[in-house]
Image: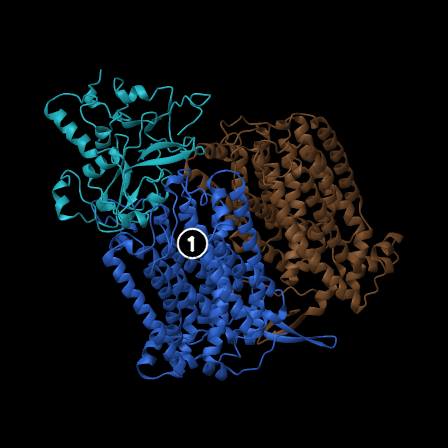
Chain colours: A cyan, B blue, C brown
């Protein structure tokens, strides 16, 4: 029997749409964990706001029966990622843990990967990021600061994964499901986001991958996304599972 | 009918080298004017390099803007050269003779200009060379799966091939110039003409080299713009780009805008250097007829692309067509494009009197290129703004002053380079014109005198 | 400047009077060999029609070979007049010997129209499928495609007739049957009549050109692409038209060779005609690959599941043998043989390559039409979820293939009995334009350029 520590982890995330309130705590947590540049009003007006995880909000229905549907979208770490073959310099590739990784100092900023991402989860540094003096101490030393001209995106907080792996090796044990998580998962108040190793049969994520509510975003276009979405159950609708958000 | 004056060899030599040996004053004024704009363009690029791409109008999700539109446009213009010199040479069309050199030179300069555009639009433009096949950093080679790696290689091949082609065709003309100049100029032309004496063997070799290069350049000509089109065609996330017709559609659009560009250049050169005896009505008449056929072929491909965009009856492709037709400001741009690119010029070319009028041909061909620039814009930008079904992240684009400056500077650059070339080398091939004269003849059919051409085979 | 041809220029030597007499004689007399071939073809046609009868009423998934044969005949015979039309537009003299031979294929268009009707009836309705007739009635393809094909046939016949009037007049004047007086419609060869004929030829030629491109578009879209769920291929109509142009050139090369070798027209059809056609033939063979590759790479690169299935269906899956033959014959062998000058200067070699390309074109139609008709019963689906197995040809299919192709050749041969296969007036006109003279020490041909 293979030791769990010798398995290839396949990091995945599950997003339960039924529980998402659209509070954006995940967005803020991600920004502070990963040194994502600050989104000023000017940046929003230029349509260049950057958030590695975003909450899409879609309005449904007519007043007074209007509903807001929230959809957290982050990099899907696609098994057949369309962003990977189009990068001329191999700045983005698929690692052996099922993640799509971005190498900042290899990126020359052609932005083809962002064009070819159907989920629109890649962010480009149009400007040199600037942090005010007061926020400099808040920067996470585990994550490199990106210069202008490079792409960035959700990395499943790879720095936390590596730290947890190193700790586990030092302590001579396997990783335990739930001992660490990404920043967004950590901050989510409702438990919408779940992170883990889908290859581990005991993990929460693996169980959710077989949930009867599970689906993937843009199924059928062949990207094999690694993020599991769980359908919203809306008692107002006739058929459970008829509305997919 | 063909209206020709009988010109002696000496007259041909003198007139076609007048741009080099007796440059008119307006050449200096024009070149100076364009040089200023080019310098402003370089300053703009410097600012861009210093402050970052935030200075442009690009955003999320419209990651590519004016620079890429301009890139595709200039690649398009560059297709005129091979069309006119290689294809028409293989088809033995006599009317190509004055146009070939100008078309080829326009090709090389347009290509060079186009090649600068993807570099300028990079986030870290100082690292552009990482796309070339070499282990520049830490054992990583470029990713050959990427269309952005195919692009620079195809472009370089076309650039080198076209440059060789021009050079081979220039050798006899260098010899003429060598014999008409003294001093430093004489030394340079002498070196460039590589000892060309006009012997039978040398002419034969020069002709064979030209034919082989023509034949080899033809597949390159088709593949370069196809590869550029696959920058867009391979992007499966943008439904409006994910269509199989892009390769021939772009190529035919390139021929359309390129041949129109050559006609514009020829008419301007004729005025500038008083080459009225060489660029005659019959030439622009024939070019106009070629352009009419190409424009209609282009329309067919455009109609196919439009139609198949609507084929699904669902999704973001329909939205893009809806944008083009019904939403301002896109529908204004669309109307402008379709009128200037096709509806005004093409029916005009049905009439012989229009095709034989220099001012009207200048007008229509400039219109065509305005239309084709807008066509590239409409094809590229709204498609990114309306990607997949995540309507929350749909976006729009507006150009910034820096982009406008740089794009204007590219036009000034190409004009300036053409003028500089005319100062150093003849823009109408001297030997080609003389060959045309040798092969010309007349025959009597009944009471009519008909122009004829001598066929050696 | 030409450096690679070392033969004397081909100057058409026959006197105008000789041309008329010669061509009329050949048109009128036919040997027993001719009637023997006609007899065999007639028998094969009957067998083919029996096969067609057996197939009608089968489910649509079995009609693929019939559709493929129709598409093949349409592609080769109805695109053939384009060779005459296009090169009359560009005012090339080398088209003259084959001009009538290519326009004569318009008569085969009538045959194509007749065999099209059952296919049109068998075409499934567009209900639940994507189609180029967006939001139109579900009988749109049936009506509009028939109308387009019929208009094209009428235009082609008109083109043939206008091009042949002077020859009908010659035949009438040389003591031909009454039918020629009717066909010649009082042609006397006045200046006004010649001018009118020229105008008619240019207009009908332009309409035919536009018509054939659009007919390729509707036939290929309605009869193959829209039958396959999820197949949206904007280049496919142009691929079909281009492969039609390649097939048309192949047909004309083969026909020119047959006329030269067996029809006795050796003096009429010079090397220059073969040489010029071979260059364009090479170009279209390269373009075959280019258009096929554009479609393939766009689909394959995107990795979308439905599109990968379509690629399997039409290229690499159940019809891979047909695809490989088409690829090799229409592109690989064709291009790598045609790039050699000695091959392009040899009419026999060109005819063999033409035959090979025609076989390749047939297999190309098989891989496109048999595959798409094999899924024609899929409704209300917008993606191809699975790739069905190969539909192999059965006895009725073989009968249809052999019979219908024989029928097309038969119609052409019979038509050539009525209408001279060599254009008398165009060859006589060539004599007017051609001169020979000495240039320095070489004998060269001088060719008048009409405006």
Nearest the viewer among C111 and B40 is B40
C271 relative to C109 in the view: left or right: left
Nearest the viewer among C332 and B36 is B36
Q: Residue at x 49, y 72 (%)?
A: B266
Q: Residue at x 55, y 47 (%)?
A: B304
Nearest the viewer among C2 and B32 is B32
Percent coordinates x, y for residue C433 in the rendering: 69, 69
Give the vertical position of C133 relative to C154 (above or below): above
Total residue callouts = 1
Give the vertical position of C438 relative to A140 (above or below): below
Image quarter of residue C185: bottom right
B263 relative to B24 in the view: left or right: right
Q: Which quadrant, please, contains the C terminus of chain B?
A: bottom right
Within-10-Å neighbours for mark 1: few <14, some 14–19, many 20+:
many
Residue topped by disc 1: B224
> Is residue B84 among the parts visible in the rendering?
no
C360 relative to B109 in the view: left or right: right
Q: Residue furthest top?
A: A1
Percent coordinates x, y for residue A167 in the rendering: 12, 27
Image quarter of residue B427: bottom left
- Secondary structure under tag 1 reads helix
Which chain contains the residue that carries disc 1? Answer: B
Percent coordinates x, y for residue C239 in the rendering: 55, 45
Percent coordinates x, y for residue B296 in the rendering: 58, 56
Q: Residue at x 31, y 28 (%)?
A: A20
Q: Which quadrant, please, contains the N terminus of chain B?
A: bottom right
């Amino acid at each position: 029997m293979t030791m769990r520590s010798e398995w290839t982890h396949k990091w995945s995330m599950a997003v339960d749409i039924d529980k998402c309130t659209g509070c954006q705590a995940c967005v803020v947590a991600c920004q502070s964990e990963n040194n994502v540049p600050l989104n000023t009003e000017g940046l929003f007006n230029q349509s260049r706001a950057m958030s590695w995880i975003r909450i899409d909000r879609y309005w449904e229905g007519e007043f007074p029966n209007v509903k807001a549907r929230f959809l957290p979208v982050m990099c899907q770490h696609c098994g057949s990622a369309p962003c990977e073959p189009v990068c001329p310099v191999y700045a983005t590739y698929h690692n052996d843990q099922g993640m799509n990784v971005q190498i900042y100092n290899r990126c020359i900023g052609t932005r083809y990967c962002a064009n070819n991402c159907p989920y629109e989860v890649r962010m480009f540094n149009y400007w040199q990021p600037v942090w005010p003096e007061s926020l400099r101490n808040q920067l996470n030393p585990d994550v490199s600061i990106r210069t202008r001209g490079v792409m960035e995106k959700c990395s499943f907080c790879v720095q936390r994964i590596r730290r947890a792996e190193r700790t586990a090796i030092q302590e001579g044990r396997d990783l335990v499901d739930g001992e660490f998580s990404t920043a967004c998962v950590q901050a989510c108040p409702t438990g919408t986001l779940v992170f883990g190793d889908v290859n581990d049969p005991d993990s929460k994520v693996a169980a959710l991958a077989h949930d009867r509510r599970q689906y993937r975003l843009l199924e059928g276009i062949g990207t094999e996304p690694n993020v599991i979405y769980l359908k919203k159950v809306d008692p107002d609708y006739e058929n459970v599972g008829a509305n997919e958000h | 009918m063909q209206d020709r004056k009988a010109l002696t060899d000496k007259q041909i030599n003198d007139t076609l080298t007048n741009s080099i040996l007796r440059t008119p004053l307006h050449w200096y004024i024009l070149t100076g004017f364009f040089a200023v704009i080019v310098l402003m363009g370089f300053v703009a690029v410097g600012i861009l390099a210093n402050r970052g791409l935030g200075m442009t109008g690009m955003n999320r999700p419209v990651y590519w803007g004016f620079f890429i539109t301009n890139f595709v446009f200039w690649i398009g213009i560059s297709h005129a050269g091979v069309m006119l010199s290689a294809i028409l040479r293989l088809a033995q069309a006599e009317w190509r003779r004055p146009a070939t050199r100008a078309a080829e030179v326009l090709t090389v300069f347009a290509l060079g200009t186009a090649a600068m555009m993807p570099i300028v639009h990079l986030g870290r433009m100082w690292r552009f060379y990482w796309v070339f096949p070499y282990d520049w950093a830490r054992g990583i080679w470029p990713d050959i799966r990427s269309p952005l790696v195919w692009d620079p290689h195809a472009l370089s091949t076309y650039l080198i091939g076209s440059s060789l082609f021009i050079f081979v065709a220039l050798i006899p003309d260098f010899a003429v110039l060598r014999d008409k100049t003294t001093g430093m100029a004489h030394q340079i032309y002498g070196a460039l003409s590589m000892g060309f004496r006009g012997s039978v063997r040398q002419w034969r070799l020069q002709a064979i080299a030209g034919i082989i290069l023509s034949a080899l350049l033809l597949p390159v000509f088709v593949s370069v713009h196809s590869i550029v089109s696959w920058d867009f065609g391979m992007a499966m996330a943008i439904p409006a780009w994910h269509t199989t017709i892009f390769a021939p559609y772009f190529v035919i659009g390139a021929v359309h805008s390129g041949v129109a560009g050559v006609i514009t250049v020829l008419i301007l050169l004729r005025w500038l250097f008083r080459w009225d005896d060489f660029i005659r009505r019959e030439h622009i008449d024939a070019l106009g007829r070629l352009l009419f056929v190409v424009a209609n072929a282009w329309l067919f491909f455009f109609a196919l692309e439009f139609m198949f965009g609507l084929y699904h009856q669902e999704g973001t492709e329909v939205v893009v067509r809806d944008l083009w037709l019904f939403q301002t400001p896109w529908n204004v741009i669309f109307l402008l494009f379709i009128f200037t690119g096709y509806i005004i010029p093409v029916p005009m070319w049905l009439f012989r009197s229009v095709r034989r009028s220099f001012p009207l041909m200048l007008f229509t061909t400039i219109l065509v290129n305005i239309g084709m620039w807008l066509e590239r814009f409409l094809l590229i930008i709204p498609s990114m703004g309306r990607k997949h079904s995540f309507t929350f992240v749909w976006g729009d684009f507006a150009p910034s002053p820096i982009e406008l400056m740089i794009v204007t500077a590219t036009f000034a650059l190409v004009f300036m380079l053409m003028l500089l070339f005319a100062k150093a080398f003849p823009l109408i091939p001297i030997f080609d014109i003389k060959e045309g004269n040798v092969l010309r003849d007349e025959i009597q059919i009944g009471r009519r005198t008909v122009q004829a051409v001598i066929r050696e085979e | 400047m030409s450096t690679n041809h070392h033969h004397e220029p081909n100057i058409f030597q026959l006197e105008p009077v000789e041309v008329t007499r010669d061509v009329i004689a050949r048109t009128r007399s036919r040997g027993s060999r001719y009637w023997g071939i006609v007899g065999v073809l007639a028998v094969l046609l009957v067998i083919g029609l029996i096969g067609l009868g057996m197939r009608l009423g089968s489910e649509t998934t079995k009609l693929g070979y019939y559709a493929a044969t129709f598409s093949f005949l349409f592609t080769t015979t109805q695109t053939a007049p384009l060779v005459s039309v296009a090169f009359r537009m560009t005012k090339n003299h080398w088209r003259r010997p084959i001009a009538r031979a290519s326009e004569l294929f318009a008569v085969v268009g009538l045959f194509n129209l007749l065999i099209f009707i059952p296919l049109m009836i068998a075409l499934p309705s567009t209900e639940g499928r994507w189609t180029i007739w967006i939001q139109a009635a579900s009988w749109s393809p049936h009506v509009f495609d028939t109308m387009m094909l019929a208009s094209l046939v009428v235009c082609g016949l008109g083109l043939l007739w206008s091009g042949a009037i002077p020859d009908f007049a010659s035949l009438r004047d040389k003591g031909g049957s009454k039918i020629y007086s009717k066909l010649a419609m009082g042609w006397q060869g006045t200046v006004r009549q010649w001018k009118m004929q020229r105008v008619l030829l240019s207009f009908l030629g332009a309409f035919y050109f536009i018509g054939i491109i659009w007919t390729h578009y509707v036939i290929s879209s309605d009869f193959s692409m829209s039958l396959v769920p999820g197949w949206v291929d904007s280049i496919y109509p142009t691929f079909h038209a281009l492969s039609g142009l390649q097939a048309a050139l192949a047909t004309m090369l083969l026909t020119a060779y047959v006329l030269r070798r067996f029809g006795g027209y050796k003096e009429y059809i010079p090397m220059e005609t073969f040489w010029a056609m071979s260059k364009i033939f090479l170009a279209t063979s390269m373009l075959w690959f280019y258009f096929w590759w554009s479609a393939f790479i766009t689909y394959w690169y995107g990795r979308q599941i439905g599109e990968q299935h379509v690629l399997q269906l039409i290229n690499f899956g159940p019809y891979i043998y047909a695809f490989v033959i088409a690829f090799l014959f229409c592109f690989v062998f064709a291009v790598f043989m045609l790039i050699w000058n000695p091959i392009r200067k040899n009419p026999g070699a060109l005819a063999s390559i033409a035959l090979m390309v025609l076989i390749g074109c047939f297999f190309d139609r098989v891989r496109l039409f048999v595959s798409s008709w094999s899924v024609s019963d899929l409704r209300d689906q917008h993606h191809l979820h699975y790739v069905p197995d190969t539909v192999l040809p059965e006895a009725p299919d073989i009968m249809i293939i052999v019979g219908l192709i024989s029928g097309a050749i038969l119609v052409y041969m019979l038509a050539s009995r009525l209408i001279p296969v060599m254009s008398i007036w165009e060859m006589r006109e060539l004599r007017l334009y051609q001169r020979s003279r000495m240039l320095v020490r070489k004998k060269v041909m001088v060719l008048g350029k009409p405006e």
